[in-house]
Image (cartoon, rainbow, N blue to C red):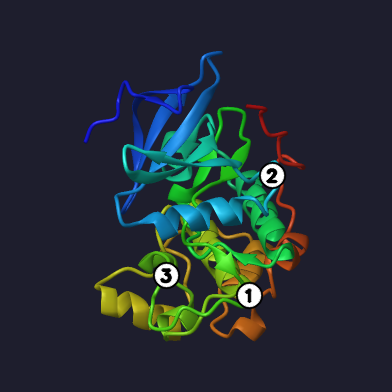
Amino acid sequence: MAIVGAVIEGRYRVIRPIARGAVSTVYLAFDRYGTPYALKVFPAGYTARAEREWRIGQRLTHPNVNPVLARLDVEGRPAVLLAYAPGDRLSDWREAHPEADFLPVFRQLLSALAHLHQRGVVHRDVKPENLIVAQSGAARLIDFDLSGPVEERLPRLRLGTLGYLSPEEAGGGAPTPASDVYAAGVVLFWGLFGELPFVGSPAEVVQAHRERMPEPPPGARTDPALWHYLTRILAKAPTERFRDAGEALAALPNKAGSGGEPPEPQEV
């Protein structure tokens, strides 16, 4: 059922799809005043996912977190209206800026996660595709339909993306703030070296997350302080990792050329 060209609730005209996730499609929409929005539409039957994103989004207010504005229904399908975050997914941004210092962007990711953790929320799917980086370098965390309270237990349900899965989640444990920290550490490894720390078949990647410590790629130049930080943020035991993103952010070493404070986020 196509919705391009439709006017939702008499206010938001759907222009075109701009992103596709595992179960959702995100469309660009404009209101009557020309203000852009992102409209995230789920298939019928995924109402709980849309409700979760809306409920979690209401708890978050931070310049590095993309706002969730409204819960809608679009031609019988559940949807959420989001602020439009200008820029590219971190995966595309990194490909277009291979020489750019990665730490300012990573610092903003930790800042966003610290905000979630302070409010008792775990993101559960930290990966480059879930961070939007604007041309200015300002970054926003997106996608909260898998997020949930720290105390929430979802038995026998593995969340997240395999390449960024924490050891405790790979072993069937519940995600915690320390699990988000581990996933952010994988993002940092990828941003610094251009590859994931563990590759192979799904079973091999799961086993590596649980048992192997990452090693620098052959020939890679590593800053000793930054590598020490990586070994802690990617520690196998949650108790040996940073407790949450706020602690990880406070411990992040300053690197020459890191640009100091992250750029101010753009207003939408």
Task: Look at the image and tell me in which quarter the C terminus lies.
Answer: top right
Using the image as rendered, state which of residue 257 and residue 134 is in the foreground.
134
Residue at (69%, 44%) from the top-left corner?
258
Amino acid type, mark 1: Arg
Give the mark nearer the N terminus: 2 vs 1: 1
* Residue, disc 1: 232
Could you give the CA–CA distance between mark 3 and mark 2, rounded to whole angstroms?
32 Å
Residue 4: x, y in percent?
30, 25
Q: Nearer the viewer, mark 3 or mark 1?
A: 3
* Residue, disc 2: 258
Using the image as rendered, state which of residue 152 and residue 65 is in the foreground.
152
Give the mark nearer the N terminus: 3 vs 1: 3
* Residue, disc 3: 159
Residue at (51%, 23%) from the top-left corner?
36
Residue 8, quarter of picture: top left
Q: Is residue 208 above or below residue 198?
A: below
Could you give the CA–CA distance between mark 3 and mark 1, rounded to whole angstroms?
23 Å
Residue 156: x, y in percent?
38, 83
Amino acid type, mark 2: Ser
